[in-house]
Image (tube, rainbow, N blue to C red):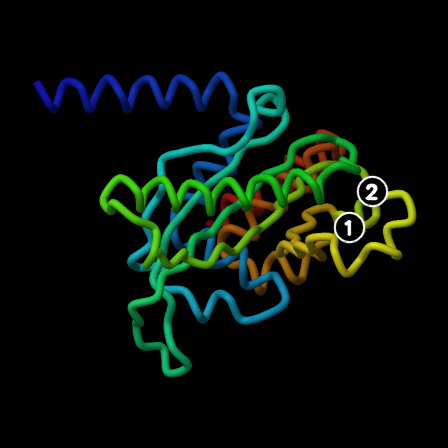
Amino acid sequence: SRKGTTRRHSRKRLEQLVRQFKENGIKMMLEHPANLRESLRMLPGRWSERIDFDRMELVKTTFVRRDYRHVESDLVLMAPLLDSRGRRTRKKLMIYVLIEHQPEPDRLMPLRMLDYTVQIFNYQVRQWTRKHSSTAKIQLQPVLPVLFYTGTRRWASPGVLADLIVGGEQFSDITPVLKPLYLNLPEISTKTLEQAGGYFGHVLRLVQQRKARPRQFDRLLAGVVRHL
């Protein structure tokens, strides 16, 4: 029956979460609109005010290649955009969140983020061609790339593609530039996590301080649980 199939799917997903909690725990929390909204509030810009999180939908696909899935996970969401008065528009935004769990920065990140973003645009083209015989009138939805770094090493910026190219500054005019929103968890202050990050920010404090001494972490955990 349909209910039985749904229960089996839910159980399988739960088992996957437990076995790969490091990779999937934050991802599953970010599927909740309130948690994603609080994450964006900690970043520059006013994206949290421009997105209709109440109508946000999960796009069930991944663009992470198999050889990276043990150190990162991604999340694709679709939501209507709001105008300057907070009213819903017909425009939609695809939000791509890459959650990077590697303990050290990845120098290839500018290339990978560009690759993932282009894959999302290609995904939109495929979705269009399934319903239309021509791409003459295709209009792609904008993509908001977000890099969420949870590692323990300092990583001030993911950089740009020109950083990887020999003499890159000479080719800046012909080199693609992608500047994702960068949620750098090791560098976010406690004040920002607790005030701008809301409830989700308090949970992220536990992730941020996971290498603390056991007694110190126990006190932090008790305080977060009381707050929640």
In the image, is 37 to the left or to the right of 217?
Answer: left
Q: Which is nearer the N-term, disc 2 or disc 1? A: 1
Q: Residues within 10 Å of mark 1 (few under 14, many from 20)?
A: some
Instruction: Single out the residue that lies furthest toward the left.
Output: 1
The secondary structure type at the circle numbered 1 is loop
Q: Secondary structure at mark 2?
A: helix
Q: Residue furthest right?
A: 167
The percent coordinates of residue 77 (x first, y second) are 40, 48
Disc 2: CA contacts within 10 A as few (<14), some (14-19) or many (>=20): some
Q: Quadrant of residue 93?
A: bottom left
User: Where is residue 104 shown, x and y percent of the image?
Assistant: 78, 33
Q: Which residue is mark 2?
A: 164
User: Percent position (x, y) of residue 162?
Assistant: 80, 50
Q: Answer whether labels 2 and 1 touch (C-beta < 8 Å).
A: yes
Mark number displayed over residue 124: none
Work out whether 92 lies above or below 18: below
Location of the N terminus by quadrant is top left
Measure the C-alpha gap from mark 2 to mark 1: 9 Å
Q: Nearer the viewer, residue 12 or 79?
A: 79
Question: Against 135, is 15 above or below?
Answer: above
Residue sitting at 75 percent across and 47 percent down?
A: 161
- Residue 159's mark? 1
Q: Residue at x 41, y 81 (%)?
A: 84
Residue appearing at x 47%, y 44% in the figure: 120
Specify the amino acid type for callout 2: Leu
**Which residue corresponds to the image point at 62% horizontal and 24% vertical from the top-left?**
68
Q: Amino acid at mark 1?
A: Gly
